[in-house]
Image (cartoon, helix red, strand yellow):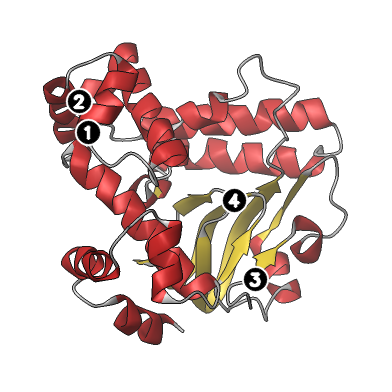
């Protein structure tokens, strides 16, 4: 298979990577990677804070207008491209998938933050005015002392907590640890099983709750039914496969456990409004 969307490794985009993390000014990062405007994926976590500039950036086929004090988070494997305009500035942080592995008691702790939910709409948001000076100061100290790996980990977690506290999260999640954990477990289960499990009742059984409880939770917090969330994950993987490699439509249908190609095409068109072939032509 010929890869259409390359995977970018951290050593390709960052100089002097220390202990699995790099923190640098956005202007210098872009000057060194000015040709990296084509669609690409990372094999590391990537976050970027804009303090100046404009244009657009796209994550997993969703496009955002850039404004100062916007921040975005990306997990390994997501497809990304950008088109920046004007004088850009801010901060870039890239860190390896295993950066916190030996530091935290819970290996999945990073996934508890809303901006690592795997849902693009949670990954792009504005830093509120009251926190901007503190966030910038922490980024600057992180940049200065990133060679101290434990300091870097603590500083990065501090930034995550500052940002999580200011998010406009649904009321159901603000003080409800149980619902937050339940939703995170549901999304994690989808990530592991979306190719084989397509019905909310299957996930509800794994979570030891009723399908009605799961649907009510998803509608209250995410504004979508559990079934829609599952289907959207299948659609996202279809879109990634359509642009990543030279798979035939039949091969993609088989990869995603569809037994009938015509049903697969109908499923995709219902969700995206175009056929898989039309989507591929538009994005390649």
Label 2 crowding class (10 Å Cα cut-off): few <14, some 14-19, many 20+? many
For the point 16% across and 39% down, the residue is 225
Q: CA distance from mark 4 to mark 3?
A: 12 Å
**Label ID, residue 200:** 1
Q: Which mark is residue 214?
A: 2
Q: Secondary structure at mark 3?
A: loop
Say which label, 4 or 1, has the lower sequence index: 4
Name the residue tied to disc 3. Answer: 6
Q: Earlier in the sequence, mark 1 or mark 2?
A: 1
Tell me residue 150's x, y (percent): 79, 25
In front of the other: 192 or 158: 192
Residue 262, by quadrant, is bottom left
* 4 or 2: mark nearer the eye: 2
The local secondary structure at tag 4 comes to loop
- Marks 4/1: CA distance? 26 Å
218 or 69, which lies in front? 218
**Percent of width and height locating residue 41:** 59, 63
Characterize the local packing of mark 3: few (<14), some (14-19) or many (20 or more) Cα atoms within 10 angstroms: some
257 versus 87 height, above or below: above
Which residue is label 4 attached to?
76
Q: Quadrant of residue 151?
A: top right
Disc 4 to disc 2: CB gap under 8 Å = no
Residue 39, percent from left and from top: 54, 74
In the rendering, at what x and y percent does residue 138 appear?
64, 36
As helix, strand or loop, the secondary structure at mark 1 comes to helix
The reply to whether the C-beta atoms of the residues labelled 1 and 2 are less than 8 Å apart is yes
Marks counted in the figure total 4
């Amino acid at each position: 298979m010929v890869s259409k969307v390359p995977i970018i490794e951290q050593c390709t985009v960052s100089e002097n990577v220390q202990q699995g993390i790099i923190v640098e000014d956005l202007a210098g990062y872009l000057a060194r990677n000015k040709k990296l405007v084509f669609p690409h994926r990372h094999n590391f976590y990537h976050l970027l804070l804009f303090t100046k500039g404009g244009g657009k950036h796209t994550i997993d086929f969703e496009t955002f207008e850039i404004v100062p004090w916007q921040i975005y988070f990306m997990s390994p494997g997501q497809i990304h491209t950008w088109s920046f305009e004007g004088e850009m500035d801010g901060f870039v942080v890239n860190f390896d998938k295993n950066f916190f592995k030996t530091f935290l008691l819970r290996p999945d702790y990073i996934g508890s933050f809303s901006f690592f939910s795997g849902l693009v709409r949670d990954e792009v948001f504005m830093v509120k005015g009251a926190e901007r000076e503190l966030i910038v100061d922490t980024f600057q100290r992180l940049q200065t002392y990133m060679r101290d790996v434990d300091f870097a980990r603590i500083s990065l977690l501090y930034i995550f907590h500052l940002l999580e506290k200011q998010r406009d999260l649904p009321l159901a999640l603000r003080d409800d640890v149980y619902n937050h954990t339940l939703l995170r477990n549901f999304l994690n289960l989808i990530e592991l099983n979306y190719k084989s499990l397509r019905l909310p009742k299957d996930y509800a059984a794994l979570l030891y709750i009723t399908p009605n409880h799961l649907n009510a939770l998803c509608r209250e917090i995410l504004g979508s039914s559990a079934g829609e969330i599952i289907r959207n994950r299948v659609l996202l993987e279809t879109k990634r496969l359509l642009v990543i490699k030279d798979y035939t439509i039949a091969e993609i249908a088989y990869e995603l456990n569809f037994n009938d190609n015509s049903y697969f095409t109908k499923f995709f068109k219902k969700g995206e409004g175009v056929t898989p072939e039309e989507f591929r032509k538009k994005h390649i």
